Image (cartoon, rainbow, N blue to C red):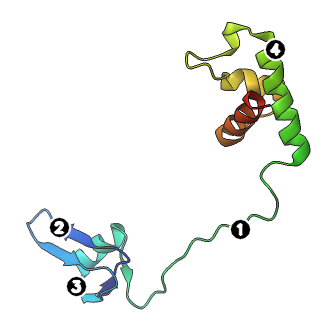
Amino acid sequence: MKVISDKDLRVTTMGGTAVLLQAGVERDLGDAIGLKAITMGARRADEPAVTHEIVIDKPLITQDEEEALVGVMNDLIDSADPDNFKSDGTPKATVVNKAAGRTVPPEEREQAWEQALNS
């Protein structure tokens, strides 16, 4: 079986056989070790490489949602309730989610927090 890997790969068996696959170099291997190589990330040489492309059609957060989230952060700052904050001074995710009425991803929460602190 001919296999190829997109990265350097060391394939070993319980019996002590070891095969090194160099990235981009096709190797002809026995079926058993070839299948093991495939389970470790290699592919059959006659199969095309799989690429993963992420396409985002719209922003992850709208301008209105961003402004509302910054408003939530400002309200938390104004309330100054220590129960709403972690020991590092940032707001608790559960508090932000409840106030925003949705589950806010960490990236959005951190960005809104920074905007609120800098406004």
Q: How many marks?
A: 4
Which disc is residue 12 wearing? 2
Task: State the CA–CA distance, disc 4 to disc 2.
Answer: 60 Å
Left or right of residue 117, residue 40 in this image: left
x%, y% of residue 88?
56, 20
Contact (Cβ within 8 Å) of mark 1 with mark 2: no
When the figure is inspected, residue 5 is found, relative to residue 87, above or below; the finding is below
Secondary structure category for the residue under label 2: strand
Of labels 4 and 2, earlier in sequence is 2
Label 4 CA crowd tier, 10 Å (few <14, some 14–19, many 20+): few
For the view shown, which residue lies furthest in the left direction? Answer: 16
Residue 7 lies in quadrant:
bottom left
Secondary structure category for the residue under label 3: loop
- Quadrant where the N terminus lies? bottom left
Secondary structure category for the residue under label 1: loop
Task: State the CA–CA distance, disc 1 to disc 4.
Answer: 38 Å
Residue holding disc 1? 55
x%, y% of residue 11?
21, 69
Contact (Cβ within 8 Å) of mark 4 with mark 2: no
Residue holding disc 4? 78
Residue 83 lies in quadrant:
top right
Q: Amino acid at mark 3?
A: Leu
Q: Amino acid at mark 4?
A: Asp
| Tag nearer the camera, 1 or 4 | 4
Q: Relative to the observer, which residue lies in front, 84 or 16?
A: 84
Left or right of residue 3, residue 106 in this image: right
Left or right of residue 7, residue 105 in this image: right
Of labels 3 and 1, earlier in sequence is 3
Q: Amino acid at mark 2?
A: Thr
Label 3 CA crowd tier, 10 Å (few <14, some 14–19, many 20+): some
Which disc is residue 29 wearing? 3
